[in-house]
Amino acid sequence: MANNKKPVSSSSGPLLIVPLDKITSQPNCRLGLFSLKDKTAYDLNLVFEESEDVIASEYEDNRIVGSSHGWVMILSKNSEFTLMNVLSRSIIQLPQAKVKPSSHTSSEQLRRTLIDKAILSVDPSHNDNYKVIIIYGLNKKLAFHCCGDKTWTTFGETQYYHDLVWFSNMLYTLRGGITIEGWDFADSCTPTRKVCVQCSYTPILSFPSDRCTTQWYLVPLLGEMLFIVRFVGEFVNHEGELLCEGDLLGEEDIHPLTCPYRTFYFQVYKVDVIEKKVEEVRSLKDQVIFLGGNHSISVSARDYQELKGNSIYFTDDYWDRMFEDYLYGGHDIGVFSLEDKSISPIYECDFVQRFYPTPFWIMPNNCNWS
């Protein structure tokens, strides 16, 4: 796959930030933007280690923890939190994210679990009244930062939040996989919970719990809210079969098979906030959904001819297992068709391959974020 130093712009359509260096054992990594339109990875001239580039040298040993409105959120090993516009290289330094670890939590584990997801309310390039909202800590709590503040403010009545999106001038959060909360930030000092919906739903299909895990998302689409369930096989072989951990080592095998976790199915539901229920969505028509560590978003395939309508484009955000093995992690990337339930690759990679930093969707500013 070609690497190109030609600049990309916000009119390039959805982009995927990826490591250009496929040799994952190297301590440094050049970043690029992969265009779905022309299947080309454009060199960002950005390296995650010491470099002559001033911007790059400031981000040694970091992790991308979110992307929203064309910006990425970067967390350093010292818990320093930075916003960077990938295309313009604009930088916004945020207050240090501090979370008190438990006595048995290593510094590396803390860094990897400190911020689970981060989004922006609006694009800071065009609106100074922006907010950064995060899911943080081992218990996945909520906090936000307003432009000009020197600290982070915690909120929410409980813990274990899984996703968050900004929709119709409110923050919507997903807790425990079934509870949707809507937060009004009219009083920026004290967000008020205006919506609380317990989503009861019957899975369209069931899968063995010992072979797969589920992840949940909220996605705004054409003025409505979608609730999406992602099924990830814990161990998946080349044929796409879900295996148990015991299947990885046969009686005559010395070394276990390497069968990374991998997404194999999605279920989509529409949320009725008034009736407090969800109903199955069988087709997205011409709409396309982008999921992962990014601020979830939908676009129309009519606006981007390179996209397949009625599909979900996804990246790896299985943080609990992302760093468990040096052979894989960040690899779970593809496009799921709601029409025939198939999954197709969207970026060239081996069956077993590690990506660092983890690929993230970068959405152009002209996308419909709400």
Image (cartoon, helix red, strand yellow):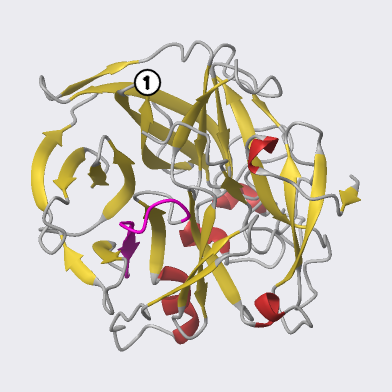
Residue 302 vertical position relative to residue 139 in the rendered view, above or below:
above
Local packing at callout 1 (Cα closer than 10 Å; few below 14, some 14-19, many 20+) is some
Q: Quick one: 128 or 217, which is closer to the camera?
A: 128
Q: Residue at x 57, y 18 (%)?
A: 341
Q: Residue at x 69, y 44 (%)?
A: 9
Q: Is 310 on the left or on the right of 79, as rendered?
A: right
254 or 215: which is nearer to us? 215
* Quadrant of image for the N terminus: top right
Coordinates of residue 75 in the picture (x, y in percent): 49, 73
Up/down of 205 relative to 218, above or below: above
User: Residue 129 lies in magenta, yes or no?
Assistant: yes
Give SS at disc 1: loop
Residue 317 shown left or right of residue 149 in the figure: right
Query: Quadrant of the rendered structure where residue 355 is?
Result: bottom right
Question: Toward the viewer: 199 or 231?
Answer: 199
Q: Is residue 31 left or right of residue 244?
A: right
Residue at 81% x, 36% y is 39
Q: How many marks?
A: 1
Residue 211's spot in the image, x, y percent? 49, 42
Name the foreground residue: 342 vs 58. Answer: 58
Kindly identify the amino acid type of the residue bearing the numbered disc 1.
Leu
**Residue 214 on image: x %, y %:** 40, 41
Name the residue tied to disc 1. Answer: 222
| Res 259 visible | no
Q: Is residue 228 above or below residue 47?
A: above
Q: Is residue 54 visible?
A: yes
Residue 20 percent coordinates (x, y): 80, 58
Left or right of residue 166, residue 110 in this image: right
Region rendered in magenta: 125-137
Locate residue 187: give its quadrant.
Answer: bottom left
